[in-house]
Image (cartoon, rainbow, N blue to C red):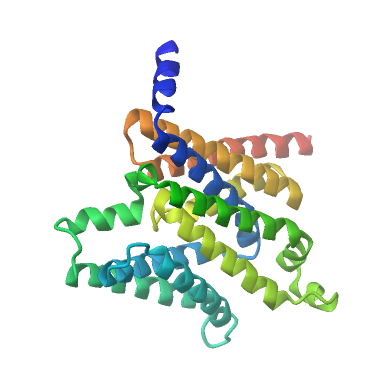
Amino acid sequence: MSELLDKFQLYFQFPFVRYALVVGVLIALCSSLLGVTLVLKRFSFIGDGLSHVAFGAMAVAAVVGLTNDMLLVMPVTIICAVLLLKTGQNAKIKGDASVAMISVGALAIGYLLMNLFPTSSNISADVCATLFGSTSILTLTQFEVWLSVALSAVVVIIFILFYNRIFAVTFDENFANSTGIKANAYNLLIAAVIAVVIVLAMNLVGSLLISALIIFPALSAMCVFKNFKAVTICSVCISIFCATAGILFSIIVSTPVGPTIVVADIAMFAVFRVIGAINSKRNKI
């Protein structure tokens, strides 16, 4: 135990470890806040679709030679989030079909561009790192950390300020409209905020694993709690704990950061599933 503590003390002397933990916790916080809303509104796959869009935008940014790819990735992802929401409301193109169209198209275009205009000699490693996450979370610059802090603060402030409206839109859009709340406007706001969270999470878990960061904490909390506020708070706690544990474990054991965090989320879901089953049996008795 003392050896483990000494190893932690040694690693925390390095700025990149502290940066990774700060950004990881912030991303976990933001993704879990909106995860409950997405699961309840059956928008879970929007995270998958937008993450593939972000991958395609990153490929375009690399081909164009942008030093800061977020200048392209962020607006493109937000625009596609709005398009996904709009096309999902179209009777001719159902929501799941529009997600599949945009996500698969963006993924294919991104990979094609990376092969046609390679920016390095090892394309497979670049693609794998972008899709599943890599050590990029451990190579964050101070600017990227402060940018993540600023964007995370915006996400949290928006959620707190519009909590009641987001709650109303999540459960009953017709009721929200009848009370004067513009449901479509808040749906667009939710989609834009999710796009921001996904772009932030690209460095942490990669584009293919982002949905896990959004969905698993929410589903875990729903196994035990039934109140919206309680589920949201529990989801945040679970997400932060799993992100912290995953990052620390990956640093010590040298495992990929993204998959390690997702495995921690899966393990936590299994634990809460068991707790929920035990509670339901007690209530029946």
How many labels were placed on the picture? 0
In this view, which residue lies farthest toward the bottom? 92
Q: Report the residue at 53% width, 88% height from top.
A: 92
> Is residue 281 left or right of 261 when viewed as pictured?
right
Q: Specify the quadrant that holds the C terminus.
A: top right
Eyeballing the image, is 256 above or below 108?
Answer: above
Q: Report the residue at 63% width, 53% height from top.
A: 33
In this view, which residue lies farthest toward the front? 143
Q: Position of residue 41 (x, y in %)?
A: 64, 65
Closer-to-camera residue (178/27): 27
- Residue 96 visible, this orientation: no
Q: Report the residue at 45% width, 40% height from top.
A: 19
In this view, which residue lies farthest toward the left? 121
Q: Position of residue 275 (x, y in %)?
A: 64, 35
Eyeballing the image, is 9 above or below 214?
Answer: above
Q: Report the residue at 57% width, 85% height from top.
A: 90
In this view, which residue lies farthest toward the top? 2
Q: Position of residue 44 (x, y in %)?
A: 55, 62
Eyeballing the image, is 214 above or below 176?
Answer: above
Q: Position of residue 208 (x, y in %)?
A: 39, 57
Q: Quadrant of residue 11?
A: top left
Q: Quadrant of residue 251?
A: top left
Closer-to-camera residue (133/285): 133
- Residue 20 visible, this orientation: yes
> Is residue 178 left or right of 155 when viewed as pictured?
right
Q: Specify the quadrant that holds the N terminus.
A: top left
